[in-house]
């Protein structure tokens, strides 16, 4: 059995796992990223933890076949990080080279959402397929596209940035500074924003009651829960979000025509109530030929997607 | 030198060329497709013409390294044609197998626009790149996407059907039966449709004068020519079309982040006047990182794109 280290580098915590080529995690742990200590110190601590996890798993760290790291930022050629979101680190660092120097082990990087997509493609909901698109519906909307069993990383590491497809000309303002982006409509933030906007003029609904007057605690999940409980006001928001989710996914189907769409992230946890709307809307937005034999599934790897995806970069 | 046959199967005419692995055409000819004679008869006549062209070029037909055929319809696994647009032929024919049986030569198929994209990628405007998107702006809007030097063909042969991305919710009705498709705005048909709609209420412009009262003869080229001649009415249509062209291309950049966008087809012949609008609009629709080092070029292969693309399927 070949073993790899999968590393999910996060703003606060970094997940590290030693994983067999079969996708089974041997040992794992989370450590504080402490990016303020600098890039070399952080990479050294990650390597020390990898060594410790290998010892715990009774294998030799020097026998690892590779280290795969998911990065919160764009990655070029699986080597160079364009910039780190929220890290006080320089631009265009060759982090793969640095980790190879520290560890002596072959190292590959990818954007964190791309890594999740690769993990789902090889070990999760996309097992056995050669093309899949993972749509990560969280605070924003991220994406990872696998075609011919390889990631579309993009010339500047921006492949799969589906959250910034424009669905509405001069639409809602996005955090990116542009307007009408997919993620302003279909992310958890988008759900909350739409709900608050509607709640400002309509308080006669279950959603408002469930908040006890505290709008600040509103989460996307509340909207889905109230819709499931039969609240029409909330169901209309689900329809609104599902419509744009259908439009965005429909566009991806027309461009890529993949075998599988994998929905992951918090919004995807809404489950059937949202999925049913999306499937209905796809008939209006996707070419019928792209829906033939298409599977739409929820992500299966959850918290392990980053670690398992890291090693999938080598398979 | 290895030689290949490139075949561009069209509704009326079929272009055939014998091409070296360097992309230089040795001999070429057009024949009538005569699809009504049936699929076997048509393929047999194409093979006979390939043999004749080899003789003319003083090489042996049996020494050909492959036959690459561009198909007006979706192609699965470079073998099976889902259906032929405007041909009285059956669905799901394995045309590659049929041609191999007739000729004894390895045969590969692809959708015709995908073939053009492959030709431009290997021998034309995309030479030397590993990722490019060809946007074919004709009667409709077609596309071919090359990533990691390979086509995105799609599970059902519908990869690169960019003309049916939805840019406007409940927008203009498209020939496909859906609404708001990219091609309803950015194709030659879209340009003519918008111009006629505006001409119905405004005849005080150069475009109307240039038509001598005969609206039926209006072509997209007239709009671009009048805009170049300073007609404000026509320039507004160019801005309108360029806006949606920017939105559609911007979405592709965010999803794929390619090195090159290649514009081909009749509308692309508008040249700088349209390209300038598109480049300006891209700043509003594409993530800035995707514009870094991006090249936007016009297709270089013209009428040879189909033939050269056919052989590019083997390289």
Image (cartoon, coloured by chain):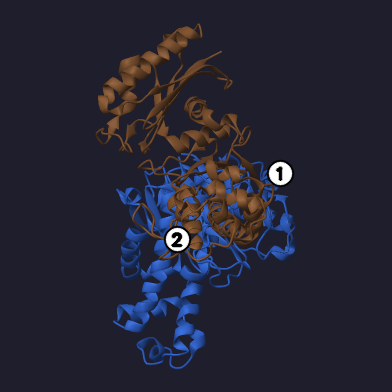
Chain colours: A brown, B blue
Q: Residue at x 30, y 34 (%)?
A: A87
Judge whether A201 appears above or below A307 on screen. below
The reply to whether residue B307 is visible in this rendering is no
Does label 2 or label 1 sit earlier along the sequence? 1
Query: x, y (%) of residue A180?
Result: 43, 60
Residue A173 badge: none
Mark nearest the camera among 2 and 1 is: 2
Q: Find residue A265 and report its horizontal and vertical position in percent.
A: 53, 40
To which chain does the residue with label 2 belong?
A: B
Residue A111 appears in the picture as rendered: yes
Q: Is residue B282 above or below residue A144?
A: below
| Secondary element type, mark 1 | helix
Q: Which mark is residue B101?
A: 1
**B71, B208: nearer the viewer:** B208
Q: Residue at x 69, y 44 (%)?
A: B97
- Which chain's residue wears label 1? B
Residue count near mark 1 (Cα–Cα under 10 Å), binned few <14, some 14–19, many ≥20: few
Question: Which element carries disc 2, helix, strand or loop?
Answer: helix
Residue at horizontal 40 percent and vertical 80 percent from the top = B222
User: Residue at 72% of width from left, 65% of height from top?
Assistant: B36
Q: Nearer the viewer, residue A260 or B298?
A: A260
Q: How many discs appear?
A: 2
Lateral position of residue A286 relative to residue B295, left or right = right
Q: Give the CA distance from mark 2 to mark 1.
A: 42 Å
User: Which residue is tagged 2?
Assistant: B248
Asked if marks 2 and 1 touch (Cβ < 8 Å), the reply is no
Residue found farthest to the front: A212
State the image coordinates of residue A210 (x, y, percent, origin top left). Answer: 57, 51
B36 to the left or right of B216: right
Q: Which one is nearer the viewer's eye here, B261 or B113?
A: B261
Q: From the top left corner, tell me how far across and down residue A48 is, in percent.
A: 36, 13
């Amino acid at each position: 059995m070949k073993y790899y280290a999968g590393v999910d580098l996060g703003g606060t915590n970094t997940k590290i796992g030693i994983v067999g080529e079969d996708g089974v995690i041997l040992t794992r742990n989370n450590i504080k990223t402490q990016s303020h200590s600098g890039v070399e110190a952080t990479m050294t601590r990650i390597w020390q933890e990898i060594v410790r996890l290998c010892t715990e798993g009774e294998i030799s760290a020097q026998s690892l076949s590779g280290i795969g790291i998911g990065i919160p930022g764009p990655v070029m050629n699986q080597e160079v990080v364009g910039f780190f979101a929220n890290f006080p680190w320089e631009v265009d660092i060759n982090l793969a080279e640095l980790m190879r120097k520290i560890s002596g082990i072959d190292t590959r990087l990818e954007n964190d959402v791309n890594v999740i997509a690769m993990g789902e493609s090889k070990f999760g909901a996309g097992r056995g397929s050669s093309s899949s698109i993972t749509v990560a519906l969280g605070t924003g909307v991220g994406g990872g596209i696998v075609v011919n069993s390889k990631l579309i990383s993009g010339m500047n590491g921006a492949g799969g940035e589906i959250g910034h497809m424009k669905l509405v000309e001069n639409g809602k303002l996005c955090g990116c500074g542009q307007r009408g982006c997919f993620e302003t409509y279909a992310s958890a933030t988008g759900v909350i924003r739409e709900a608050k906007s509607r709640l400002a003029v309509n308080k006669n609904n279950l959603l408002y009651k469930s908040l006890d007057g505290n709008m600040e605690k509103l989460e996307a999940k509340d909207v889905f829960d109230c819709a499931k409980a039969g609240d029409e006001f909330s169901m209309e928001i689900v329809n609104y979000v599902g419509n744009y989710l259908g439009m965005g996914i429909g566009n991806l189907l027309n461009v890529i025509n993949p075998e599988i769409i994998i929905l992951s992230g918090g919004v995807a946890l809404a489950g059937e109530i949202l999925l049913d709307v999306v499937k209905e809307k796809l008939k209006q937005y996707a070419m019928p030929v792209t829906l033939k034999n298409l599977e739409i599934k929820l992500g299966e790897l959850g918290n392990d997607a980053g670690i398992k995806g890291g090693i999938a970069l080598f398979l």
